[in-house]
């Protein structure tokens, strides 16, 4: 189980190409299913929110990175109508007010717990009215309705508060297959390991588009072979992620 704070801000890496595909900017919640259906990615010098990773395409959510099988799992926001519908619904759990089914406002949600293997939101952290510290987590099965800015909970929800969410608090579908968490010898800092592997992958690849810096100066042309010098130029110009997303194997 992970809180949203432990997921937002993580880099996304592809396993096949060992590429850094961006940073998790936000989580797109489906109120009808009670699940995180998509992760929204942010890129340097690219308008935030224009790329998505569907949750079923996530192989693992670790302490240091979110893993996907390959870079094709990162898709354009406009290519998935369901994601656009969820964005329009704009149901966000954190900071939502909490009201009981009997009509009493009791506080708000300060955090949520997510089953990183399925994307299921399993609990909401309750911050009581007038308090500065949360009182515990409300298991998701005690939430009656997730609405825009308000969630409705069982009138007896206080009886089920927990300090942390465990499998005993969930209503899991045991038939669901769970993604495998990829592990390996990263020799210390896993991000440095992926950066090294990513650079080795990029060198010798072919760029598929023209990439320019903020002043319009061309850093690399379509068809150019990626060299260590080009990588350094892209990093200096904050165009490294754009470069990694626009390469292909050289014929």
Image: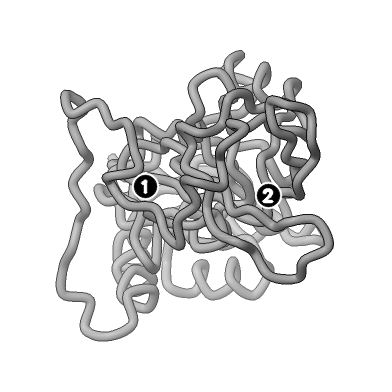
Residue at 31% from the left image edge and 57% from the top image edge: 18
Q: Is residue 60 visible?
A: yes
- What element does badge 2 sit on? strand
**Residue 40 placed where, x, y %?**
59, 41
| Gap in angstroms between the C-alphas marked 2 and 1 | 19 Å
Drawn side of residue 105 relative to residue 159, left or right: right
**Residue 125 placed where, x, y %?**
59, 53
**Residue 222 placed where, x, y %?**
54, 44
Q: For the residues labelled 2 and 1, say whether their Cβ atoms are less than 8 Å apart.
A: no
Outermost bottom residue: 188
Front residue of 144 and 89: 144
* The N terminus, quarter of image: bottom left
- What element does badge 1 sit on? loop
Q: Is residue 43 visible?
A: no
For label 2, the residue is 109
* The C terminus, quarter of image: top left
**Vertical comparison of 214 with 56: above or below:** below
Q: Image quarter for residue 215?
A: bottom right
**Residue 247 placed where, x, y %?**
43, 46
**Vertical comparison of 154 with 67: above or below:** above
Front residue of 114 and 14: 114
For label 1, the residue is 116
Front residue of 223 and 70: 70
Residue at 44% from the left image edge and 41% from the top image edge: 122
Crowd band around label 1 with a 10 angstrom C-alpha radius: few (<14), some (14–19), many (20+): many
Residue at 35% from the left image edge and 43% from the top image edge: 169
Q: How is the image coloured?
A: one colour
Residue at 58% from the left image edge and 24% from the top image edge: 144
Q: Mark 2 or mark 1: which is in front? A: 2
Q: Can you tell which mark lies on residue 135? A: none
């Amino acid at each position: 189980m992970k809180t949203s704070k432990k997921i937002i801000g993580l880099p996304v890496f592809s396993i096949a190409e060992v590429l850094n595909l961006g940073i998790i900017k936000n989580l797109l919640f489906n109120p009808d299913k009670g699940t995180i259906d998509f992760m929204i990615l942010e890129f340097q010098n690219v308008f935030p929110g224009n790329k998505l990773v569907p949750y079923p395409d996530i192989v693992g959510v670790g302490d240091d990175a979110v893993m996907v099988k390959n870079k094709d799992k990162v898709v354009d926001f406009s290519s998935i109508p369901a994601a656009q519908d969820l964005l329009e619904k704009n149901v966000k759990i954190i900071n939502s007010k909490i009201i009981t089914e009997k009509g009493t406002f009791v506080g708000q949600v300060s955090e949520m717990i997510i089953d990183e293997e399925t994307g299921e939101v399993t609990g909401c952290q309750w911050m009581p009215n007038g308090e500065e510290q949360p009182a515990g987590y409300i298991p998701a099965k005690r939430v009656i309705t997730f609405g825009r800015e308000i969630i409705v909970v069982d009138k007896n929800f206080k009886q089920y508060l927990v300090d942390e969410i465990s499998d005993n608090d969930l209503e899991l579908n045991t038939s669901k297959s769970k993604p495998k968490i990829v592990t390996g010898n990263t020799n210390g800092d896993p991000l440095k390991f992926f950066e090294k592997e990513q650079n080795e992958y990029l060198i010798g690849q072919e760029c598929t588009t023209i990439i320019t810096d903020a002043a319009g100066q061309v850093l690399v042309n379509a068809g150019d072979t990626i060299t260590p010098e080009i990588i350094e130029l892209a990093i200096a110009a904050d165009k490294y992620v754009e470069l990694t997303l626009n390469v292909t194997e050289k014929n």
